[in-house]
Amino acid sequence: MPATEDQAESLAPTLRLEEPIPAFRARTTQGEISSSDYLGKWLILFSHPADFTPVCTSEFVAMQQSLSEFSDLNCNILGLSVDSVYSHIAWISSIKKDFGVEITFPIIEDISMSIAMAFGMIHEESTGTATVRSVFFIDDKGILRALIHYPMNVGRSISEILRTVSALQAADESKMSAPEGWQAGDDLVIAPPTSVAQADIFSTAADSPGESWYYSKAPGSA
Ligand code: BEZ
């Protein structure tokens, strides 16, 4: 049933980049957790539409197989759907049996949809009361740094999620920015000049092809 205008307004995602995430407590496949447990670590909170579905299974297998790379970035993983913890347990048992992969990261049960609503993971028009494929990139201070939403019929790229965490951390450390397609170890781009005097200095320094007074690269600090 389509949402009324009032409902649609209350379902609209209100989370904004650079703001603290809503605090939550939840039951998961690994016991009870609280959002504050993750302070001091980066966190990927990702929702999926339903347990026992093929695209979601492919994402979970790939996520588990990349867990050590996330760990190297001091980044934890937390799944979520509106299914019960019993359903999550049965699904991950089936993934272990049929795909040989043991899912070790926690998966939140959000039957009441309270977390899904607070994070804007319910997009009524596309999934009814199921969560869309959302990914929330949360830094070690509990601040939302990036988010993506994918529809039901397109799986996410776990390597792009890893790349984005890595790029956010490199940009923080270097106070520079990651250009298109940036990969760990690549140069970053320097903030463009904000005065004519600065532009003159940048213009003199930017003497290689592929550089300009507003576009120059430098190695990151790592
Ligand atoms: C999936 O393949 O992940 C999927 C299929 C139908 C509904 C929701 C998810």
Image (cartoon, grey):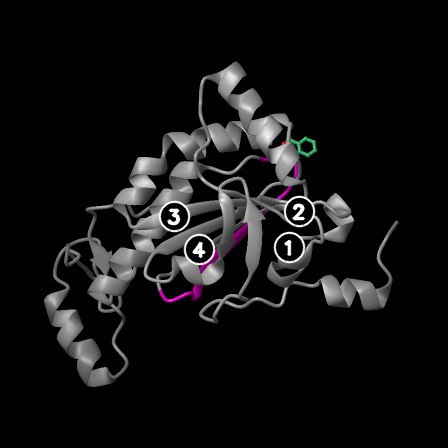
Please state which amino acid type lies under the numbered disc 3: Asn
Judging from the image, what secondary structure is the residue with disc 3 in? strand
- Residue position for label 4: 137
What is the CA distance from the residue labelled 3 to the residue labelled 1? 19 Å
Please state which amino acid type lies under the numbered disc 2: Thr
Q: Residue 98, can we see it?
A: yes
Tell me the magenta residue range: 141-154
Q: Which residue occupies 53% across, 68% down?
A: 16
* Residue neighbourhood size for the residue with mark 2, other residues' Cα within 10 Å, grouped as few (<14), some (14–19), many (≥20): many
Judging from the image, what secondary structure is the residue with disc 1 in? helix
**Does 156 sit left or right of 77 as displayed?**
right
Residue 113 horizontal/vertical position (percent) = 69, 54
- Residue position for label 3: 76
Q: Residue 118's quadrant in the figure?
A: bottom right
**Does 128 sit left or right of 34 as displayed?**
right
Q: Earlier in the sequence, mark 4 or mark 3?
A: 3
Please state which amino acid type lies under the numbered disc 1: Ala
Q: Between residue 12 and residue 215, name the one nearer to us.
A: 12
Q: Earlier in the sequence, mark 1 or mark 2?
A: 1
Label ID, residue 116: 1
* Residue neighbourhood size for the residue with mark 3, other residues' Cα within 10 Å, grouped as few (<14), some (14–19), many (≥20): some
Q: Earlier in the sequence, mark 2 or mark 4?
A: 2
Q: Is residue 209 above or below residue 9?
A: above
Q: Which residue occupies 30% across, 37% down?
A: 68
Judging from the image, what secondary structure is the residue with disc 4 in? strand
Q: Earlier in the sequence, mark 1 or mark 4?
A: 1
Please state which amino acid type lies under the numbered disc 4: Phe
Judging from the image, what secondary structure is the residue with disc 2 in? loop
Q: Earlier in the sequence, mark 2 or mark 3?
A: 3
Magenta span has 18? Answer: no
- Residue position for label 2: 131
